[in-house]
Image (spheres, rainbow, N blue to C red):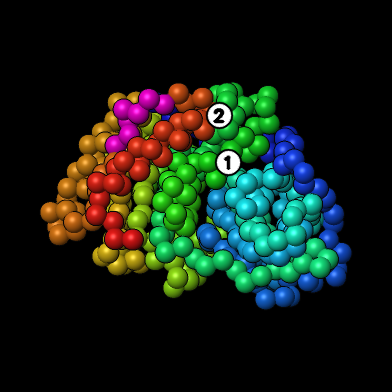
Amino acid sequence: MPSEAQHLISRRTLVTGAVAAGLTVAVATPSRATASRATTAPARYRTVGRTAPAADGFVQFTWPGVHFEARFAGTGVGVVLDDSVNDYDVQIDGVTVRTLVTPGRATTWVDGLADAVHTVRLVKRTESPWSVGKFGGFLPVRGGAILSAPRARRRQIEYIGDSFTAGYGNVSGTRDCSGVGGVDRNSNADLSFGALTARALGADHQLNAFSGRGMVRNYAGTSPGTDYRTYYDRALLNVDGDVWQRPPTWRPQLVVIGLGINDFSTPLQPGEPWATEAELVAAYETAYHGFLDKLRARYGPHPHLLLSSTQVSTPAPYRETVERITRTRSTQGDPRIHHWYYGDAPLDFLACDWHPSAQDHRTLSTLLLDRLSTLRLHW
């Protein structure tokens, strides 16, 4: 099993997005009038994922997979963005019609549709821990209208993890992505196993994933003094002390946790807080229990918490430790704690830096669905 690479690949190389046949797509810098229409009108779209308000009326975000959904009548729709770092997919009636590569501050118009009621979904494909993306809303074409927002789905899943959860480099088709645009141009969070599983179940989902981070130790001991828990509470990962204002409507019935690959996949280095593997395991186990306590305090006793583990490149008690945590919680009276091991899955790791490929994510989604079928989920 390969170790997780740090997310340090250049973001500058572009890949052109494909346009569905029969549609006209135009990109224009929004005029003041256009921007005003997008930002001052009541938000008639639905947000899935963590966002925070921006001073200019846009909403801002950093986590991968954040998406926005709306309904509109007419022959087209405009998408208002301000982001020179991330990539997005625009989906009309469930079909991706455009990939926006680092669009900047612009309105992208998708036109040439049948004059009818349609759905539009904008999804952030990439990770951007240190760079904020901003969304200004959807605009109707002349004669059209943005309709009332779609209803939230009753089923909700929260995914917590690292690059495997984020879909790091998953659509590259090669392990060396330096010549094909780098990690960002070849990542699609919407094709991660979590997103695929949520769609199969008709569920809303959050993809709260941060590459290179572990429960107590980051990849190869990097960024000492921080770990995934440093950032979990934030809406904006780049803002120290930021706290996401969780809406009361976000009450996931299932939380899937995948933290440990970075803790255990590389040998301990001199100067790290843990002199031995046993000390690292003890710290990991204590922190994991504390993190589960946090989730229970936030969401209550009813959601199912699924703790995942897999094989890592160095011999390490990753699986055994997660299994022990699961057993301990169960014996303490929490029957909705479960373990999912996928280290035996036939994965090819043909994505950037030996990460799971798009095919691997489909395999993992199938395995996860199988595991969930054994749980008594009360959706």
Q: Which residue is drawn at 41% across and 51% down?
A: 201
Magenta span covers which residues? Answer: 341-347
Where residue 100 appears, x then y in whole percent?
Answer: 72, 46
Q: Tag 1: Cα neighbours inside 10 Å, few (<14), some, or many (≥20)?
A: many
The amino acid pointed to by label 2 is Cys
Residue hosting label 1: 188
Q: Which residue is drawn at 71% across and 65% down?
A: 73
Q: Quadrant of residue 81?
A: bottom right
Q: Residue at x 45, y 35 (%)?
A: 362
Q: Quadrant of residue 321?
A: top left
Work out whether mark 2 precedes mark 1 in sequence or the reverse, and give the earlier one: 1
Pick the front one: 93 or 348: 93
Q: Are marks 2 and 1 in contact (CB under 8 Å)?
A: no
Mark 2–mark 1 Cα distance, whole angstroms, equals 12 Å
Please say whether residue 56 is one of the residues in the magenta stretch. no
Residue hosting label 2: 352
Image quarter hosting the C terminus: bottom left
Q: What element carries label 1?
A: loop
Q: Quadrant of residue 368?
A: top left
- How many marks do you count on the picture? 2
Is 181 placed left or right of 370 in the picture? Answer: right
Image quarter hosting the N terminus: top left
The amino acid pointed to by label 1 is Asn
Where residue 108 appears, x then y in whole percent?
Answer: 78, 54
**One can see residue 194 in this view:** no
- Above or below for 190 versus 376: above
Q: Tag 2: Cα neighbours inside 10 Å, few (<14), some, or many (≥20)?
A: many
